[in-house]
Amino acid sequence: MRIKDVPQDDGLNKGMSEITYAVDENGRYAGVRSLGWEPKNIVNAQAWEVITDDLAAIIGMVRAGKRSPIAYHMARRLMTVGLLASYVRLPRWRVKRHLKPSVFSRLKPEILQRYADIFGLTPAQLRDIPDADMPLPDEDTP
């Protein structure tokens, strides 16, 4: 794609630009600012709708006592069990066990602190889950 053909379709970026690489007049790749591309914006919006629906379902499971708050914080940050296990330096099977409310309620303070540190929260905040019908917090806020 040539520099003059880089799309400038405003979308989820809300006026913020991203770098796209295109070919300049000399045939070399150069970084060009782009507001977005409509097909990409549509797909990203659809993906965020699915993520929001999944988070609402997980909130419901936590409130129903089927999952621990770790499941919510993990999903909110788009983490898998394997990724979270590597961050907290625990085997996957232990992280999976910690997703059970009965096991979570008995976690040692040191383990809770490790999870809290990964999520940028205090151990008390780790237990807090928003209501399913409330808007979800921004990713920038812990």
Image: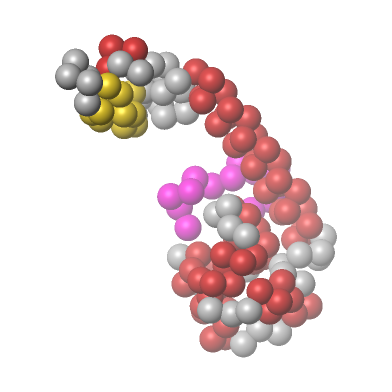
Counting from the top left corner in percent of width and height, residue 105 is at: 71, 79
Looking at the image, residue 96 lies above or below residue 75? below
**Residue 29 lies within the magenta run:** no
Range of residues picked out in magenta: 128-142
> What residue is at 54 percent from the left and 86 percent from the top?
110
* Position of residue 37 in the picture relative to residue 82 (left or right): left
> What residue is at 33 percent from the left and 29 percent from the top?
20
Looking at the image, residue 93 lies above or below residue 55? below
**If the image is split into quadrants, where does the N terminus sit?**
top left
The quarter of the displayed image where residue 63 is located: bottom right
- Say if residue 128 shows up in the picture: no
> What residue is at 54 percent from the left and 47 percent from the top?
137
Counting from the top left corner in percent of width and height, residue 69 is at: 67, 65
The quarter of the displayed image where residue 43 is located: top right
- Say if residue 94 shows up in the picture: yes
From the viewer's side, name the closer residue of 45 and 125: 45
From the viewer's side, name the closer residue of 32 and 54: 32
* Position of residue 62 in the picture relative to residue 31 (left or right): right
Magenta: predominant secondary structure element?
loop
Looking at the image, residue 134 lies above or below residue 82? above
